[in-house]
Amino acid sequence: MADMSPLKVKMPELDPQIRNKNFCEVALGYTSEMAVAEANRCLQCKNPLCVSGCPVNVQIPDFIKLITEGNFEGAYLKIKETNSLPAICGRVCPQERQCEGKCVRAIKGESVAIGRLERFVADYYRENCNTNTSKITPNGRKVAVVGSGPAGLTCASDLAKLGYDVTIFEAFHTSGGVLVYGIPEFRLPKAIVAEEIKGLEDLGVKIQNNVVVGKTITVDEIIDMGYEAVFIGSGAGLPMFMGIDGEASLGVYSANEFLTRINLMKAYLEDYDTPIKTPNSVAVVGGGNVAMDAARCAKRLGAEHVYIVYRRGEEEMPARKEEIHHAKEEGIEFVLLANPKRILANDKGEVSELECIKMELGEPDASGRRRPVEVENSEFLLRVDSVIMALGTSPNPLISKTTQGIETNRRGCLVVDENMQTTKSGVYAGGDAVTGAATIILAMGAGKIAAKSIDEFLKAKN
């Protein structure tokens, strides 16, 4: 019989006043005993709503049942049937809005900790089991994947398992896309990402780094090289700004640039010569996970004051509740119902203050959220030396502008049908390149659909 405790088994974490000074992973993971105890909270529903909330269709009750039996290796292999990156998803998926959000245990308490259990079995398998990949019979057909982020890695993995000769073309010198440049070490250790990518290479997937598709080579040229289909998973790396006075001042960053310097270029390590300003007082504009990541990184770089400036209230913040909670624990200061009006600079052109105006929530807008409205004559100043804009991103137009027959929408995102087929035959796309900035697991779901569609397209071709 299920354990009817209303609360999840708490996951151990580093002390907030210690972790906010280093980049060590915050959440320490379950022990075997904790994992079994949490797994026993699962009701093993006959109609598991949690599965319907998973974009990659992980058979959640099945893997949790294996945990209760102590079969941790089997639980991992069950997840791997549909999810190529369980160690990553267990750490950074927004489970509370997806699988855990559908869990019936949440009606009268907390949901089953599906994400924590996924992380546990992935870590257990990596540390204790043989990770050799079984041999796959090649089918002699070549497919190219543009981008080694979550969409590209998932598509490549699924195609490789079907026997395709897959090559990933990655613009950066390190593979992993947003997993390595966007998410901080304290949330997702880069050794975990490297291990997942190694598993992909063990399947036979080849990765060519430092290839900027649209500049180094075009999609059309890739097709001319003998690749019968192409999947574009190039993400959305073009940052957005507000267009306010002073945005060109020294000390203003996009969150993309700030996080890339820290995560990919290791600016927080003394033996890396990566230029980045050591801030004293920082304002991060935005309320999503990226804003939380940027703020928590700034704190770890030594900033005394780090402000999150968001034009709505905490309840409207799109960031994960866990990330907001961790940020507060680490001393991040929240300036809510406020919006920047201009950035003031000193005579050297360096940021000195951020002028904001107070907001109040009016009627709902098209997104269903109450629209923020300025409160007249409510301007105030924050004394800061850095401002980080975490307002979202859009796809870089480099690929769309250099590929014949491919269409984009008004937001610059690639247009696809339900099979992830673009307007160009044999070219598919998914993830942030199609949706704009979204979640890792949604990108992975798109990669899975695209792989299935490419397989069907190529089989129909012959």
Image: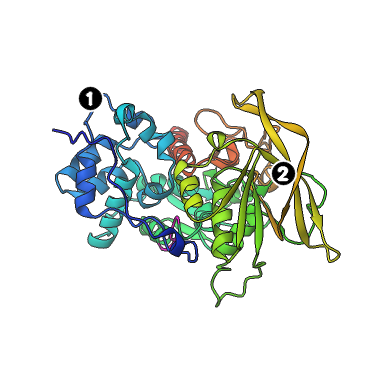
Horizontally, residue 122 falls left or right of residue 337, namely left
Q: Which residue is more in the foreground, 216 or 9?
A: 9
Amino acid type at image mark 2: Lys
The secondary element bearing badge 2 is classed as: helix
Residue at the location (58% across, 32% down)?
Answer: 416
Figure quadrant of residue 395: top right
Figure quadrant of residue 358: top right
Q: Is residue 188 magenta?
A: yes
Task: Using the rendered image of the protein, determine whether residue 140 is visible from the camera's viewpoint.
Answer: no
The secondary element bearing badge 1 is classed as: loop
What is the quadrant of the C terminus in the image?
Answer: top left
State which region is magenta: 187-191
Q: Which residue is more in the foreground, 255 or 194?
A: 255
Residue 418: percent from left, percent from top? 51, 28
Q: Name the residue furthest bottom.
A: 271
Tell me how far mark 1 sits from mark 2, CA to CA. Answer: 49 Å
